[in-house]
Image (tube, helix red, strand yellow):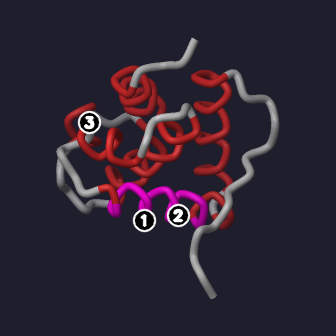
Amino acid sequence: MKPTIAEIIMATAREFRVGQFDITGFSRDRRFTLPRFVVYAIAHDAGFSYPRIARSIGDRDKTSVIAGKLRAAEFAATDPGFAASYAKLRHELLGADNPVQFKSSRVA
C-alpha cells in the first residue's frame, strides 16, 4: 500500500530527528532542508505528482519540489550517511530493495 505524504513526513522526521513542522516549514537551515528533500524524493517515488507534493509541504511551488529532488540526488551521491538514511526510508516506506537510481532532468 502506498504511504501518504503525511506518513512520509512522519517517518522522515523520525529518521533525521527533526520535527514535522521543521520539514513543512520554510527554514533554509540544512538540518531541515535535507529531510525536506528526502520527503520530496520519496513522495515522488511513491507516485505523487510534483504539484500535489508542493501543496502538501507548505504550499510551495512545484519547481521547488523538482529542484529539491535533484538536490537529494546530489547529496546522496556525495554523502554516504544521507544516502543510507534515504535508502532506509525508501525501503521502509516503499518496500524498495533496489539501489536508489536518481535520474537527472537537467539539460546539459
> Alpha-carbon distance for marks 3 and 1?
16 Å
| Residue visible at 80% across and 43% down in the picture | 99
| Residue visible at 33% across and 47% down in the picture | 51
- What range is drawn magenta here? 63-74
N-term-proximal mark, 3 vs 1: 3
| 26 relative to 90 in the view: left or right | left
Report the quarter where the C terminus lies.
bottom right
Report the quarter where the N terminus lies.
top right
Residue type beneath disc 3? Ser
- Residue tagged 2: 70
Out of 96 and 46, give the one closest to the viewer: 46
N-term-proximal mark, 2 vs 3: 3
- Residue tagged 1: 67
> Alpha-carbon distance for marks 2 and 1?
5 Å
Above or below, comparing residue 51 to residue 98 in the picture = below
- Residue tagged 3: 56
Q: Are marks 2 and 1 in contact (CB under 8 Å)?
A: yes
Q: Are marks 2 and 3 in contact (CB under 8 Å)?
A: no
* Image coords of residue 79 (percent x, y): 63, 60
* Image coords of residue 31 (percent x, y): 35, 52
- Furthest residue to the right? 98
Is residue 64 highlighted in magenta?
yes
Residue type beneath disc 1? Ala
